[in-house]
Amino acid sequence: MDTCLVRMRVNGRPVEREVPARKLLSDFLREDAGALGVNVGCEQGVCGSCTVLVDGVPARACLAFAVQVDGAEIRTVEGLTTDGSLHPLQQAFHDHHALQCGFCTPGMIITAYDFLARHPRPSIAEIREALSGNLCRCTGYQQIVEAVQDAARLGAVPEGGER
Amino acid sequence: MKPAPFAYHAPRRLEEALALLGALPEAKLLAGGQSLIPMMNFRLARPQHLVDLARVDGLASIRAVGERIEIGAMTRQAAVETSAVVRDGCPLLVDALRHVGHYASRTRGTIGGSLAHADPASELPVVASALDAELVVAGPGVTRVVAPAEFFRAPLTVALDRREILTAVSFARIGPRVGWGFTELNRRHGGFAIVCVAAVLEVDGAGRCTKAAVALGGVAGVPVRSAGAEAGLLGHPLDDRRIDAAAAAVAGDIDPGSDLHASAEYRREMAQAFTRRALVQARGRFQEGR
């Protein structure tokens, strides 16, 4: 069986497609689920741009085949926004000018979201370590760290994440 | 790039997985995929069949069994890192896991996948070597237990027949008079090791070293146990002079190569420096208590 039936819930919406087994989760999310916030950078797990939450835990979408996570609940950066208004964590990135070209931003946001859900009061060193797997080639790290620090201070992400 | 086409198999039981390996000579096992999938994306690996172990019953568990901690091969690295059983019984493993990729790769990467992949610059084979891990291997109709020295054969090559599956690994519990250290040199946090060192030291009531294990990664195709360093510590109090001499002795046990990341000379120097740090960490754990 070179093709497989894959079912997922992506940001709360069910998606069901017959796809080739070799289809990466990142491509499934972009092409089949319309989640274009999943940015595909290096396709080798280095840049972190395609980081999404798979059943609530962060993963590189380019390092999983869609079929491997059949049945999963996926959350992408689009899933943080409600009623078209920015999530407080996104607002913090906006307020701190924590993006230039924006390519790394969805991965940064998802990584920071998961990190803050597990570490509500992080130190700067902990924030830097948590974001170390996400590359920003505009080199805006300083503002990104400040945004995450501010988001922590404001309680932008509840402990354990949003339900 | 995108991977070449393949057929996907998701067995539910170990026997089914073994049967698939027996029937499909071109099959490759898929664990967490954090090393295999990048290789497939680059088409450095083009398996015709992938046998995914993620849905096989009973391969993902962490159990304290007597004086050992047994971890199922498909246990995700993040689950091991956050396990209270592992933190209590095998904290060296937790320290080493923090150097394995990043959290978002450890949520999918597995203990068994990393060991079976056997990258010479990866951390878990070094820990397995330092702790004399027991690697449990299931084959058609038979299960065997393999020691690290036998398991790690060459870069990316382990003592697994193509019909066999690594199902679990067990580590001796780190006892009350045992200290451990893990140090790593790399260019970026989460990158592969230029050099990494795992040290485990046991002392008696008089402070003399009764057991020493010093294992290094990044300096050869497989993890290296430094017999010179270990012999220099055994039977002696762990003072600075002994630790310096043991770290220096590492140079005689390794023959590192040069690559674009580091020259052989640099690796040799750093192997000594990072061994010294790992030994000091291990000693510090007796002095300060855990």
Image: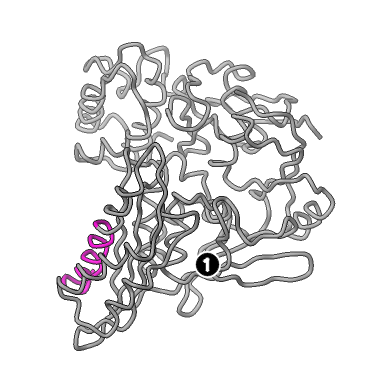
Q: At 21% from the left edge and 40% from the top edge, which residue is drawn?
A: A125
Q: Which residues are magenta?
A: B273-290
The residue sitting at 33% across, 43% down in the picture is: B186
Report the residue that reaches farthest toward the right: B23
The picture places residue A5, in percent across and down from the top left corner, at 75, 30
Magenta segment includes B7: no
| B127 horizontally vs B54: left or right | left
Residue closer to the observer: B187 or B224: B224
Residue A22 in the image: state x and y as whole percent.
69, 30
Quarter residue A84 falls in: top left
Residue B144 pos. (x, y %): 66, 72
Relative depth, front residue between A148 and A11: A148
Q: Please, is residue B188 above or below residue A40 in the view?
A: below
A128 vs B253, left or right, is left
The quarter in which the N terminus of chain B is drawn is: top right
Q: Quadrant of the C terminus of chain B?
A: bottom left
Question: In the picture, residue B87 is in which quadrant?
Answer: bottom left
